[in-house]
Amino acid sequence: MREFIFLIKGECHTGVPPEEYQKQAAKFAAWIYGLIQNGHLVNSRPLGTNGRRVTANNITDGPFIESKEDIGGYFLIRAKDLDEATLIAKGCPALESGGIVEVRAVDEEKVSRLREKLGPEFK
């Protein structure tokens, strides 16, 4: 099994009526529960809308919620390959409201090299 990151982009609940938000939250909970039951979920966290973008020459304060490229959260999952990870991502409820799930493989070669340099504490 390999690890993949799902970056959830462009999904925003601002201005959504409470009852609709509850329906969306229930769909997410069911999807996440399925990931857990099937042994796919390693970790997941929603991200806040406040923060900073840092470049070599600039620091910009958020919120970033207006951006279509806003990252609302991430999932670290296990799948046998990119095709299976993509199939899992297609079930994400964020897609129903125009969100995007970017699927990226964890680069295990780089992880191994970092572990060699930094020791077993690097996970």
Image (cartoon, rainbow, N blue to C red):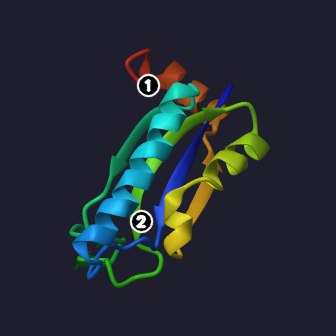
State the residue at coordinates (31%, 67%). 21
What residue does disc 1 label?
Answer: 123
Residue 20 in the figure: left or right of residue 96: left
Determine if residue 86 is in view: yes
Considering the image in quadrants, where does the C terminus appear?
top left
**Residue depicted at 43% across the width and 17% down the height:** 119
User: Foreground mark, 1 or 2?
Assistant: 2
Count of marks placed on residues: 2
Please name the amino acid that badge 1 sits on. Answer: Lys
What percent of the width, then of the height, locates residue 31? 50, 45
Separation of marks 1 and 2 at Cα, in angstroms: 23 Å
Is label 1 in a helix, a strand or a loop? Answer: loop
- Coordinates of residue 81 in the picture (x, y in percent): 76, 37
Q: In this view, does 63 lie above or below 31?
A: below
Residue beneath the point at 45% across and 44% down: 30
Which residue occupies the foreground of this view, 31 or 61?
31
Residue type, mark 2 in image: Ile
Give the residue at mark 2: 71
Q: Residue furthest top?
A: 120
Between 88 and 61, the one nearer to me in the picture: 88
Residue 80 is situated, as x and y percent measured from the top left of the image, at 73, 31
The N terminus sits in image quarter: top right
Horizontal and vertical percent position of residue 27: 44, 54
Image-based side of 3 in relation to 84, left or right: left
Q: Which of marks 1 and 2 is nearer the N terminus?
A: 2
| Mark seen at residue 6 | none
Q: Nearer the viewer, residue 108 or 47?
A: 47
Is residue 99 visible to the viewer in this orientation of the structure?
no
